[in-house]
Protein backbone atom coordinates (compact mmCIF):
# COMPACT_ATOMS: atom_id res chain seq x y z
CA UNK A 1 0.00 0.00 0.00
CA UNK A 2 2.81 2.43 0.90
CA UNK A 3 4.60 1.73 -2.40
CA UNK A 4 1.37 2.53 -4.20
CA UNK A 5 1.07 5.84 -2.35
CA UNK A 6 4.68 6.72 -3.20
CA UNK A 7 4.07 5.89 -6.84
CA UNK A 8 0.92 8.03 -6.88
CA UNK A 9 2.84 10.99 -5.45
CA UNK A 10 5.50 10.59 -8.16
CA UNK A 11 2.87 10.35 -10.90
CA UNK A 12 1.07 13.42 -9.53
CA UNK A 13 4.29 15.44 -9.51
CA UNK A 14 5.17 14.38 -13.07
CA UNK A 15 1.67 15.19 -14.29
CA UNK A 16 1.78 18.66 -12.73
CA UNK A 17 5.22 19.33 -14.15
CA UNK A 18 4.10 18.28 -17.65
CA UNK A 19 0.95 20.38 -17.35
CA UNK A 20 3.02 23.30 -16.11
CA UNK A 21 5.34 23.03 -19.08
CA UNK A 22 2.43 22.88 -21.52
CA UNK A 23 0.57 25.83 -20.03
CA UNK A 24 3.17 27.79 -18.08
CA UNK A 25 2.11 30.94 -16.25
CA UNK A 26 4.19 34.04 -15.65
CA UNK A 27 5.11 34.28 -11.97
CA UNK A 28 6.62 37.27 -10.19
CA UNK A 29 7.54 37.31 -6.50
CA UNK A 30 7.69 40.83 -5.07
CA UNK A 31 9.52 41.21 -1.78
CA UNK A 32 12.40 43.04 -0.18
CA UNK A 33 16.02 42.15 -0.89
CA UNK A 34 15.93 39.75 2.05
CA UNK A 35 14.89 36.19 2.82
CA UNK A 36 12.13 36.90 5.33
CA UNK A 37 8.54 36.05 4.47
CA UNK A 38 9.30 35.20 0.83
CA UNK A 39 12.09 32.67 1.23
CA UNK A 40 9.96 29.55 1.66
CA UNK A 41 8.15 30.52 -1.55
CA UNK A 42 11.46 30.94 -3.38
CA UNK A 43 12.66 27.54 -2.14
CA UNK A 44 9.39 25.89 -3.20
CA UNK A 45 9.76 27.42 -6.65
CA UNK A 46 13.33 26.15 -6.90
CA UNK A 47 12.38 22.71 -5.62
CA UNK A 48 9.55 22.31 -8.13
CA UNK A 49 11.43 23.86 -11.04
CA UNK A 50 8.94 26.68 -11.61
CA UNK A 51 10.33 29.69 -13.46
CA UNK A 52 9.66 33.11 -11.97
CA UNK A 53 10.84 36.69 -11.70
CA UNK A 54 12.44 37.44 -8.34
CA UNK A 55 11.61 41.13 -7.94
CA UNK A 56 13.45 42.53 -4.93
CA UNK A 57 12.83 45.92 -3.36
CA UNK A 58 16.17 47.48 -2.55
CA UNK A 59 16.79 48.30 1.13
CA UNK A 60 18.89 51.45 1.46
CA UNK A 61 20.68 52.65 4.58
CA UNK A 62 19.63 56.13 5.62
CA UNK A 63 22.06 58.76 6.72
CA UNK A 64 21.86 58.97 10.50
CA UNK A 65 20.49 55.45 10.86
CA UNK A 66 17.55 53.38 9.75
CA UNK A 67 16.57 52.14 6.30
CA UNK A 68 14.43 53.23 3.38
CA UNK A 69 12.76 51.29 0.55
CA UNK A 70 11.91 53.86 -2.13
CA UNK A 71 10.50 51.47 -4.77
CA UNK A 72 8.41 49.60 -2.21
CA UNK A 73 7.04 52.89 -0.89
CA UNK A 74 6.17 53.97 -4.43
CA UNK A 75 4.38 50.68 -5.16
CA UNK A 76 2.50 50.97 -1.89
CA UNK A 77 1.37 54.48 -2.76
CA UNK A 78 0.35 53.48 -6.29
CA UNK A 79 -1.86 50.63 -5.09
CA UNK A 80 0.33 47.94 -6.71
CA UNK A 81 0.43 46.07 -3.37
CA UNK A 82 -3.26 46.41 -2.51
CA UNK A 83 -3.81 42.64 -2.77
CA UNK A 84 -1.64 42.24 0.34
CA UNK A 85 -2.97 45.34 2.12
CA UNK A 86 0.03 47.40 0.94
CA UNK A 87 2.54 44.89 2.29
CA UNK A 88 4.98 42.39 0.84
CA UNK A 89 5.34 39.64 -0.26
CA UNK A 90 3.11 39.57 -3.30
CA UNK A 91 2.87 36.89 -5.98
CA UNK A 92 1.69 37.85 -9.45
CA UNK A 93 0.24 35.00 -11.54
CA UNK A 94 -0.16 36.13 -15.13
CA UNK A 95 -0.62 39.61 -13.72
CA UNK A 96 -3.15 38.62 -11.04
CA UNK A 97 -1.78 39.49 -7.58
CA UNK A 98 -2.03 37.17 -4.56
CA UNK A 99 -1.39 38.44 -1.04
CA UNK A 100 -0.55 36.68 2.25
CA UNK A 101 2.69 34.70 2.39
CA UNK A 102 1.05 31.42 3.45
CA UNK A 103 -1.55 31.58 0.67
CA UNK A 104 1.30 32.21 -1.76
CA UNK A 105 3.27 29.26 -0.39
CA UNK A 106 0.28 26.91 -0.69
CA UNK A 107 -0.45 28.01 -4.25
CA UNK A 108 3.17 27.52 -5.34
CA UNK A 109 3.41 24.17 -3.53
CA UNK A 110 0.18 22.90 -5.10
CA UNK A 111 1.24 24.01 -8.58
CA UNK A 112 4.58 22.32 -8.09
CA UNK A 113 3.22 18.98 -6.88
CA UNK A 114 4.46 19.47 -3.32
CA UNK A 115 1.12 18.98 -1.53
CA UNK A 116 0.87 15.19 -1.72
CA UNK A 117 -1.12 12.91 -4.02
CA UNK A 118 -4.56 13.10 -2.40
CA UNK A 119 -6.72 15.65 -0.57
CA UNK A 120 -5.97 13.81 2.68
CA UNK A 121 -2.22 14.07 2.13
CA UNK A 122 -2.61 17.75 1.26
CA UNK A 123 -4.46 18.34 4.54
CA UNK A 124 -1.79 16.47 6.53
CA UNK A 125 1.01 18.43 4.87
CA UNK A 126 -0.84 21.69 5.48
CA UNK A 127 -1.39 20.83 9.14
CA UNK A 128 2.33 20.24 9.70
CA UNK A 129 3.14 23.54 7.98
CA UNK A 130 0.69 25.24 10.34
CA UNK A 131 2.38 23.63 13.35
CA UNK A 132 5.65 25.19 12.17
CA UNK A 133 3.90 28.55 11.83
CA UNK A 134 2.67 28.19 15.43
CA UNK A 135 6.29 27.89 16.55
CA UNK A 136 7.35 30.99 14.64
CA UNK A 137 4.38 32.94 15.98
CA UNK A 138 5.18 31.85 19.55
CA UNK A 139 8.77 32.99 19.12
CA UNK A 140 7.62 36.36 17.79
CA UNK A 141 5.28 36.81 20.76
CA UNK A 142 8.18 36.10 23.10
CA UNK A 143 9.49 39.49 22.08
CA UNK A 144 13.27 39.18 22.00
CA UNK A 145 13.72 39.88 18.28
CA UNK A 146 15.69 42.75 16.80
CA UNK A 147 12.51 44.71 16.05
CA UNK A 148 11.21 44.56 19.64
CA UNK A 149 11.72 48.10 20.91
CA UNK A 150 9.90 47.93 24.25
CA UNK A 151 12.36 45.70 26.14
CA UNK A 152 15.84 46.21 27.52
CA UNK A 153 18.76 44.15 26.23
CA UNK A 154 18.86 42.31 29.57
CA UNK A 155 15.19 41.37 29.32
CA UNK A 156 15.62 40.24 25.73
CA UNK A 157 18.53 38.03 26.75
CA UNK A 158 16.44 36.40 29.48
CA UNK A 159 13.52 35.78 27.14
CA UNK A 160 15.83 34.42 24.44
CA UNK A 161 17.42 32.00 26.89
CA UNK A 162 13.98 30.81 28.05
CA UNK A 163 12.83 30.27 24.48
CA UNK A 164 15.77 28.21 23.28
CA UNK A 165 16.34 26.27 26.51
CA UNK A 166 12.76 25.37 27.43
CA UNK A 167 9.97 26.48 25.14
CA UNK A 168 11.37 25.64 21.70
CA UNK A 169 12.44 22.10 22.72
CA UNK A 170 8.89 21.47 23.96
CA UNK A 171 7.40 22.66 20.67
CA UNK A 172 9.80 20.56 18.63
CA UNK A 173 9.20 17.39 20.64
CA UNK A 174 5.45 17.72 20.07
CA UNK A 175 5.90 18.30 16.35
CA UNK A 176 8.26 15.31 16.24
CA UNK A 177 5.51 13.14 17.70
CA UNK A 178 3.09 14.41 15.09
CA UNK A 179 5.40 14.10 12.08
CA UNK A 180 7.10 10.77 12.79
CA UNK A 181 4.09 8.66 11.64
CA UNK A 182 3.70 10.91 8.57
CA UNK A 183 7.31 10.93 7.42
CA UNK A 184 6.65 9.34 4.01
CA UNK A 185 3.90 11.88 3.31
CA UNK A 186 5.91 14.86 4.54
CA UNK A 187 9.18 13.86 2.86
CA UNK A 188 8.95 11.10 0.27
CA UNK A 189 10.98 11.03 -2.94
CA UNK A 190 10.47 14.79 -3.20
CA UNK A 191 10.16 16.92 -0.06
CA UNK A 192 6.70 18.41 0.47
CA UNK A 193 5.69 21.94 1.44
CA UNK A 194 5.74 20.85 5.09
CA UNK A 195 9.27 19.48 4.72
CA UNK A 196 10.47 22.84 3.42
CA UNK A 197 8.82 24.56 6.41
CA UNK A 198 10.62 22.17 8.78
CA UNK A 199 13.92 22.82 6.99
CA UNK A 200 13.43 26.58 7.29
CA UNK A 201 12.66 26.27 11.01
CA UNK A 202 15.72 24.13 11.76
CA UNK A 203 18.30 25.31 9.24
CA UNK A 204 17.62 28.92 8.23
CA UNK A 205 18.82 32.00 10.11
CA UNK A 206 21.96 33.43 11.64
CA UNK A 207 24.61 30.85 12.47
CA UNK A 208 24.29 31.43 16.21
CA UNK A 209 20.50 31.00 16.07
CA UNK A 210 20.74 27.87 13.93
CA UNK A 211 23.14 26.40 16.49
CA UNK A 212 20.65 27.09 19.29
CA UNK A 213 17.81 25.52 17.28
CA UNK A 214 19.98 22.47 16.60
CA UNK A 215 20.51 22.01 20.33
CA UNK A 216 16.78 22.41 20.97
CA UNK A 217 16.08 19.79 18.28
CA UNK A 218 18.36 17.14 19.78
CA UNK A 219 16.36 13.95 20.03
CA UNK A 220 14.00 14.99 17.20
CA UNK A 221 15.31 12.40 14.77
CA UNK A 222 12.52 12.66 12.23
CA UNK A 223 12.60 16.45 12.04
CA UNK A 224 16.36 16.46 11.63
CA UNK A 225 16.21 13.79 8.91
CA UNK A 226 13.60 15.80 7.01
CA UNK A 227 15.57 19.04 7.33
CA UNK A 228 18.68 17.28 6.09
CA UNK A 229 16.83 15.73 3.13
CA UNK A 230 15.61 19.17 2.05
CA UNK A 231 19.06 20.71 2.52
CA UNK A 232 20.64 17.91 0.45
CA UNK A 233 18.18 18.16 -2.44
CA UNK A 234 20.10 19.37 -5.54
CA UNK A 235 17.58 22.13 -6.36
CA UNK A 236 17.65 23.48 -2.82
CA UNK A 237 21.44 23.24 -2.58
CA UNK A 238 21.75 25.14 -5.85
CA UNK A 239 19.36 27.87 -4.72
CA UNK A 240 21.00 28.33 -1.31
CA UNK A 241 24.45 28.49 -2.90
CA UNK A 242 23.43 31.04 -5.55
CA UNK A 243 20.84 33.24 -3.82
CA UNK A 244 21.76 36.85 -3.06
CA UNK A 245 23.57 37.40 0.22
CA UNK A 246 21.33 39.60 2.35
CA UNK A 247 21.31 41.02 5.87
CA UNK A 248 18.29 38.90 6.88
Image (spheres, helix red, strand yellow):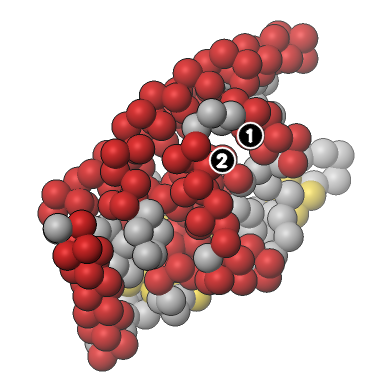
Q: Label 1: which residue?
A: 214
Q: Position of residue 233 (x, y in %)?
A: 53, 65
User: In the displayed image of the protein, which residue is found farthest to the right?
Assistant: 64
Residue 94 vs residue 194, the one in the foreground? 194
Q: Is residue 136 visible?
A: yes
User: In the displayed image of the protein, which residue is found farthest to the bottom?
Assistant: 22
Give SS at disc 2.
helix
Compared across the picture, whether 132 is left or right of 244 comes to: left
Q: Earlier in the sequence, mark 2 or mark 1?
A: 2
**Tag of residue 140:** none
Residue 107 vs residue 236, the one in the foreground? 236
Quadrant occupied by the N terminus: bottom left
**Tag of residue 202:** 2
Compared across the picture, whether 162 is left or right of 89 comes to: right
Q: Is residue 97 visible?
A: no
Q: Is residue 216 above or below residue 179?
A: above
Residue 218 vs residue 154, the one in the foreground? 218
Give SS at disc 1.
helix
Distance Cα–Cα, label 2 vs label 1: 7 Å
Residues at discs 2 and 1 in contact (Cβ within 8 Å):
yes
- State the count of labels: 2
Residue located at (45% from left, 52% from top): 196
Residue 200 vs residue 93, the one in the foreground? 200
Q: Badge 2 local density, few (<14 within 10 Å), some, or many (20+)? A: many
Amino acid sequence: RQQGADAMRTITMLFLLLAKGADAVALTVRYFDARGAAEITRVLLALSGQQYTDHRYKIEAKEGGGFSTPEFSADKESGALAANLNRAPLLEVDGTPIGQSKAIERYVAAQGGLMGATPLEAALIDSVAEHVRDVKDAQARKGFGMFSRDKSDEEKTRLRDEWYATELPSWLQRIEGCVAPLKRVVCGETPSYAAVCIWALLREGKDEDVALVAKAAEGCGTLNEIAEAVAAHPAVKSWVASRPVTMM
